């Protein structure tokens, strides 16, 4: 492994320490190297906090002069909630900057590199670029489209059922899989389900982790076109720690919405489409509200609608070694389904891993074979 890749791997490992805390900003790591020695390191801890480059340079101190800075994303050159990193890099005396990938932000996209080069600093771009893109797949979509990155998660039996024909679903997946899902919730901005899931399972949808892990409760979004969310639902009982948003339409009774609002539920009205919430409009509004990373834990109806509207980026299927059976037992994806095999929703970049007795299949969405 060449030196540039070696040090960029260190920077990438640092970057992921900000997982779930930097949104809607990217995860970024940086290391300062001089004479073959790492003399400074840092990562972006959370949105609004100093960037990775600043933390790394402050860690290195005066030894930064004549050193090489490795950073997983192009240094910023504009004022946001923090000053431009390029100014600090130039002032530090860094002689070379190695960048993994350019920042896709229209305010940047090569601007930071240009400023550094004009200041006489050598810049190399593209070291482990695909790795850097992958860890920031959420940011890359959000900053270029304004829309959240949407992950569909579901748990099913080996014969493809998410519940019995009576609607009972606890627990299909193993404890290890459930803890994995809680870690997912700990990393996202919001979790979304349909009203059917709430009425059937009465879930909390909050983050529950073992030990002393840092816990972040995401916004809990309920898609409920007719305002059927019960006032006594368990997720409302935990609203002080984890906010709840009800997404509904004009079909919901105003008096019911007023009662939910008094309990602290955020009400978001979206135009209806055939009696249902317009999911495309919802996703757009969530992006405008800085929801960059959305985890869907819905039932078969919501899952199919999102797939049909082309709103899913990634799927995570937890498969348990259990057989449920039943023609009426629900499957992860309902709706009408496709008529021809050439119209199927195709997965690519598949990954398969074991979680206890379960299997987790992860993939990205495409259409057709």
Image: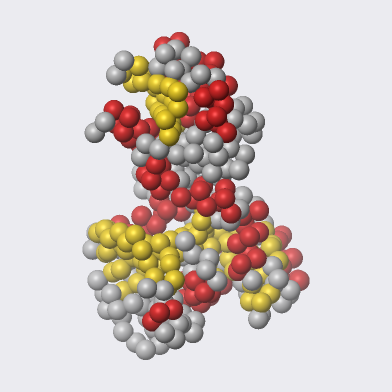
Q: Who is closer to the viewer here, 185 or 109? A: 109
Q: Who is closer to the viewer here, 333 or 221? A: 333
Across and down, in percent, residue 288 comes to 66, 53
From what the image shows, is residue 306 above or below residue 85?
A: below
Q: Residue at x 44, y 43 (%)?
A: 19
Farthest residue in the right direction?
Answer: 254
Farthest residue in the bottom direction?
Answer: 327
Q: Who is closer to the viewer here, 71 or 294? A: 71
From what the image shows, is residue 15 above or below residue 139?
A: above
Which quarter shows the N terminus?
top left
From what the image shows, is residue 219 above or below residue 212?
A: below
Residue 252, quarter of the rendered image: bottom right
- Residue 330 left/right relative to 302: left
Which quarter shows the C terminus?
bottom left
Q: Residue at x 49, y 71 (%)?
A: 307
Across and down, in percent, residue 284 comes to 63, 60
- Residue 345 left/right relative to 352: right
From what the image shows, is residue 152 above or below residue 22?
A: below
Q: Is residue 122 visible?
A: yes
Q: Who is closer to the viewer here, 185 or 232? A: 185
* Numbered label tally: 0
- Residue 86 left/right relative to 165: right
Residue 225, quarter of the rendered image: bottom right
Across and down, in percent, residue 170 comes to 37, 70
For the rendered model, the colour scheme is secondary structure
Q: Residue at x 32, y 30 (%)?
A: 4
Across and down, in percent, residue 301 comes to 51, 77
Q: Residue at x 28, y 69 (%)?
A: 320
Q: Is residue 242 visible?
A: no
């Amino acid at each position: 492994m060449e030196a540039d890749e070696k040090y960029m791997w260190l920077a990438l490992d640092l970057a992921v320490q900000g997982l779930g805390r930097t949104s809607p900003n990217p995860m970024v790591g940086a290391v300062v190297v001089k004479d073959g020695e790492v003399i400074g390191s840092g990562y972006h801890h959370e949105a609004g906090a100093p960037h990775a480059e600043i933390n790394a340079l402050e860690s290195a101190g005066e030894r930064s002069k004549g050193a090489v800075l490795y950073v997983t994303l192009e240094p910023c050159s504009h004022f946001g909630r923090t000053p431009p990193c390029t100014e600090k890099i130039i002032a530090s005396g860094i002689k070379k900057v190695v960048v993994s990938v350019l920042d896709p932000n229209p305010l940047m996209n090569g601007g930071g590199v240009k400023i550094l080069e004009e200041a006489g600093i050598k810049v190399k771009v593209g070291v482990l670029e695909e790795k850097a893109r992958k860890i920031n797949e959420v940011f890359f979509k959000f900053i270029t489209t304004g829309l959240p990155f949407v992950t569909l998660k579901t748990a099913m039996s080996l014969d493809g059922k998410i519940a019995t024909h009576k609607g009972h679903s606890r627990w299909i997946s193993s404890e290890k899989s459930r803890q994995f899902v809680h870690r997912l919730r700990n990393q996202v901005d919001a979790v979304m389900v349909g009203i059917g899931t709430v009425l059937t399972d009465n879930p909390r949808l909050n983050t529950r982790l073992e030990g002393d892990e840092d816990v972040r409760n995401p916004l809990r979004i309920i898609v409920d076109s007719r305002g059927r969310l019960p006032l006594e639902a368990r997720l409302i009982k935990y609203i002080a720690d984890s906010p709840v948003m009800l997404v509904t339409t004009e079909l919901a009774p105003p008096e019911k919405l007023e009662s939910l609002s008094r309990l602290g539920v955020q009400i978001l009205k979206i135009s209806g489409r055939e009696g249902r919430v317009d999911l495309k409009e919802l996703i757009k509004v969530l992006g405008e509200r800085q929801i960059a990373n959305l985890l869907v834990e819905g039932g078969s109806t919501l899952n199919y609608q999102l797939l049909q509207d082309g709103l899913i980026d990634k799927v995570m299927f937890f498969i348990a070694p259990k057989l449920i059976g039943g023609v009426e037992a629900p499957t992860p994806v309902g709706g009408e389904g496709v008529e021809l095999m050439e119209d199927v929703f195709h997965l690519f970049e598949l990954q398969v891993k074991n979680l206890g007795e379960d299997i987790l299949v992860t993939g990205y969405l495409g259409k057709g074979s």
